[in-house]
Amino acid sequence: MMHVATRSALILAFVLVSLEPPLAHADCVRNEEFDQISAVVTEGFYDRTFRGLDWPQRVARARAGIDCNGDERALARVVNELLGELHASHTDLYTREDPEYWALHSIFSRSLTDFAVPFLGIWPERRDDRWFAKYVLDASPAQFAGIRAGDELIRMNGGEYTAMPRGEITTLTISSDGKRQRTVTLTPQVKSLQRFLYDATFNSRRIIEIGRARVGYFHLWAGTHGAYLERLNAALQEFEKVSVDAIVVDFRGGFGGAGPEYAERLRRIARPKYLLIDDGVRSGKEWVTALVKRDQVATVVGSRTAGAVLAASVYPFADDRYLLYLAVEPFAPEGIGVLEGIGVEPDIAVAPCREHCAGRDPQLEKVFELIGERRPRE
């Protein structure tokens, strides 16, 4: 699923900039929209060499491929193909059909309530023209309906699957194993994506019995608001109070936004600790992962992080029908160095399951295996 970090608490500074110049009446409105968007990229992208590309030539070539009769999603595909040539994180164009559109709006608003939208709690991923649930948020309608990461999302309301539901009731046809299908009925919840991530973080805390060991588990879905750090520290305090035998902090998925303070309480805990990572760990959470690994605060388990660590801004266009997410500054954490395009490798590598997992989570299962190999405290 991706993300951002702030320079105040997290050193990455982001500015919400609203650009909504009036669209001229022209033969091709999509060309007008493309020109506005590409102009902001040309003016604001942090690498003024544009990765050595002949940027004006690339822009002109992309413009020639615009379908004037296409919808917003068609234009976004053209723009994102162009942006993809820059090979930079935090650089995409989103429409209202994308969860990221709503998540970034609510994250940059600094509010847990702004930009409420119906949502099921599924962060989807398209793989070879098929949709899969890459992540399922804790305590979401999708989780309560029994949908798990790796489930194939085949149909929604009898038609093509879309990430953002429409209507008060949603039916999803899914397959957990690639063989059998089942249909579930869900009622979307209406709240901001920031609130979804916060509530998922809050509701992730639990104690799991692994053999004779009691394990404290906590999933940090984002660090984009001070409330997330409060929840993390509260969970760690509770785990210490009840004397768990080991602690697992799950960073996978969601958004970034965290900074060094997210590792401080974890440093002070003497029990065995594990940090779960994958390619959905981005930005500020990558910074924290690098610190945890460097200082041996916890054993890092999973797969390489996204390598997506740049400062970015967001720019609405065309009556808010598009949201441009644009990298505007480089960032190399002191004592860590450049993570953009590199990421953080785990101490113990375990590939994730992404398709037809039937409820399995090999990365978390590996952590449980490691904990089971330890003798619990007497």
Image (cartoon, rainbow, N blue to C red):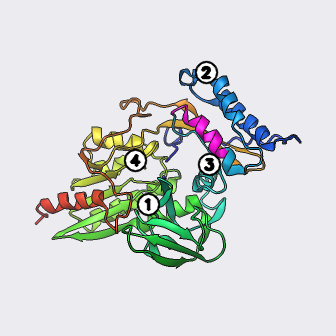
Q: Quadrant of residue 160?
A: bottom right
Front one among 148 and 17: 148
Whole-percent x, y for residue 317 in the image? 74, 44
Q: Which residue is mark 3?
A: 108
Q: Residues within 10 Å of mark 3 (few under 14, many from 20)?
A: many
User: Gap between marks 3 and 1, in whole Å?
Assistant: 20 Å
Q: Is residue 50 left or right of residue 183?
A: right
The kind of secondary structure the magenta stretch mainly shows is: helix
Looking at the rendered structure, the kind of residue marked 4 is Asp
Which of the two discs, 2 and 4, sits closer to the camera? Answer: 2
Which of the two discs, 3 and 2, sits closer to the camera? Answer: 2
Whole-percent x, y for residue 92 in the image? 59, 42
Q: Which residue is mark 2?
A: 54
Q: Is residue 128 above or below residue 62?
A: below
Query: Which badge, 1 or 4, comes first in the chain's sequence?
Result: 1
Query: Which badge, 2 or 1, comes first in the chain's sequence?
Result: 2
Looking at the rendered structure, the kind of residue marked 1 is Arg
Disc number placed over residue 231 in the picture, else none: 1
Q: Quadrant of the C terminus?
A: bottom left
- Whether residue 201 is visible: yes
**Is residue 5 rendered magenta in the image?**
no
Which of the two discs, 3 and 1, sits closer to the camera? Answer: 3
Range of residues picked out in magenta: 76-87
Q: Residues within 10 Å of mark 2 (few under 14, many from 20)?
A: few
Q: Secondary structure at mark 1?
A: helix
Q: Which residue is mark 4?
A: 279
